[in-house]
Image (cartoon, helix red, strand yellow):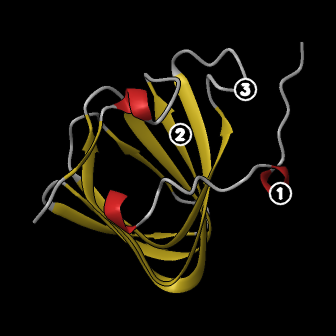
Amino acid sequence: MIYLTNIDSVEPDRKMDREKGFTAMELRWLLSEANAPMGLCTIGHTRKRKGGEHRAHHHLHADEVILMLQGKAIEVVGDEQVELKKGDCLFIPRGVVHSHRVTEEPVETYCIYIGAGSIEKTGYILDEK
């Protein structure tokens, strides 16, 4: 069986809003346990506008990989900071606090969670500062 989705055919996740730590950002879940046998992986696509950010958070049960498709952003991972640009691929181990801020618009990424079949199962926790 083939499991195929397209960014433009998937509705944005409206639950991922300011309360969850997202600003000026649209997130679509391309593949997860909701539409494929993805017990240990979830793949999302984000588009962020100027001023877009994902506040400090961590995942208790999943590692995260961010693949930059377009734009530039600052990612803070633990106590370190890195500028991400088109083509960069960043690994963030589970449990490590991280945040993402747009520096050049637009920003487009894939986010891949390894170890969980949905965002709920990643153990997502927003870290208030």
**Quick check: 35 left or right of 43?**
right
Task: Give the number of the mark in front: 1 or 2.
Answer: 1
Q: Alpha-carbon distance for marks 2 and 3?
A: 15 Å
Mark 2, residue position: 112
**Cβ atoms at labels 1 and 2 below 8 Å apart:** no
**Quick check: 78 left or right of 90?**
left
How many other residues sit within 10 Å of disc 3, few (<14), some (14-19) or many (≥20)?
few
Residue 77: percent from left, percent from top: 24, 56
**Depth check: 114 or 81 in front?**
114
Give the mark nearest the N terminus, 2 or 3: 3
How many other residues sit within 10 Å of disc 2, few (<14), some (14-19) or many (≥20)?
many
Give the mark nearest the N terminus, 1 or 2: 1
Mark 1, residue position: 8
Does residue 83 lie above or below 21 as drawn?
below
Amino acid type for the residue under numbered disc 2: Ile
Q: In the image, what residue occupies the spot 10% across and 66% down? A: 129
Residue 35's label in the rendered image is 3
Residue 53: percent from left, percent from top: 39, 72
Quadrant (top left, top right, bottom left, bottom right) of the N terminus: top right
